[in-house]
């Protein structure tokens, strides 16, 4: 059984941000765990609190699972590849089948933060996370390479 632990999830996100040496307001988009369950609103709440961002200030957020389903132990790896492709090709992929958004989510972030169609947009920093059984949590920060 999964028993979400908001303290551990938020710590995971904050630690990743600190380890990357960035500020939460630099994150352009999030590729997250979101699995179209009743706990998605709790996950959004955890992101909002960890980033100290909400409403229209919240970055775009998506989940590859909306397009390919949950691939269990392969999910994180596949989603990392999709995250890097988004950065490289400068787009944010949509969340499909998300037209009837959970009202609890709309109390936390703007509906515009959850794209339902492809957005062409440069991404500098993307946060990728998976939160799992028994508090096996991971958050990685991907930053676009700038040749200076």
Image (spheres, helix red, strand yellow):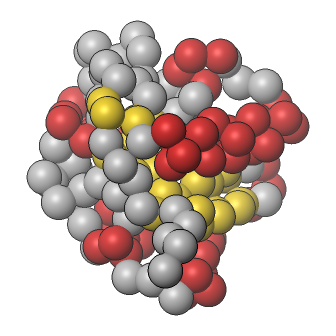
Does 39 appear above or below 93?
below
> Is residue 44 visible from the viewing direction of this image?
no
Which picture quadrant has residue 64?
top right
In this rendering, position of residue 78 left or right of residue 64: right
Tell me if I can see residue 116 in this picture: yes
Residue at the far front: name it: 148
Question: Looking at this view, is 116 or 92 the one in front?
Answer: 92
Q: Position of residue 73 (x, y in %)?
A: 86, 37
Q: Is residue 130 above or below residue 39?
A: below
Q: Position of residue 65 (x, y in %)?
A: 60, 25
Quadrant in the rendering for residue 13: bottom right
Left or right for 25, reference 133: left
- Pick the front one: 40 or 17: 17
**Quadrant of the image for the N terminus?**
top right
**What is the x, y in percent for residue 9?**
58, 65
Is 64 or 132 nearer to us in this picture? Answer: 64
Q: In the picture shown, does residue 142 fall above or below 33?
A: below
Q: Is residue 78 left or right of residue 49?
A: right
The residue furthest right is 73
Residue found 62% across the figure and 86% down from its top: 19
Q: Position of residue 122 (x, y in %)?
A: 35, 49
Q: Farthest left residue? A: 56
In which image quadrant can residue 101 be found? top left
């Amino acid at each position: 059984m999964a028993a979400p632990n908001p303290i551990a999830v938020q710590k995971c996100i904050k630690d990743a941000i600190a380890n990357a040496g960035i500020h939460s307001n630099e994150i352009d988009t999030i590729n997250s765990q979101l699995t179209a369950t009743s706990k998605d609103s709790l996950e959004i709440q955890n992101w909002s609190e960890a980033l100290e961002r909400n409403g229209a200030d919240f970055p775009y957020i998506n989940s590859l699972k909306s397009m390919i389903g949950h691939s269990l132990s392969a999910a994180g790896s596949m989603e990392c590849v999709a995250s890097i492709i988004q950065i490289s090709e400068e787009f944010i992929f949509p969340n499909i089948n998300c037209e009837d958004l959970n009202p609890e989510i709309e109390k936390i972030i703007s509906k515009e933060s959850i794209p339902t169609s492809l957005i062409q947009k440069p991404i500098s920093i993307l946060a990728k996370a998976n939160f799992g059984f028994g508090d096996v949590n991971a958050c990685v920060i991907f930053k676009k390479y700038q040749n200076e």
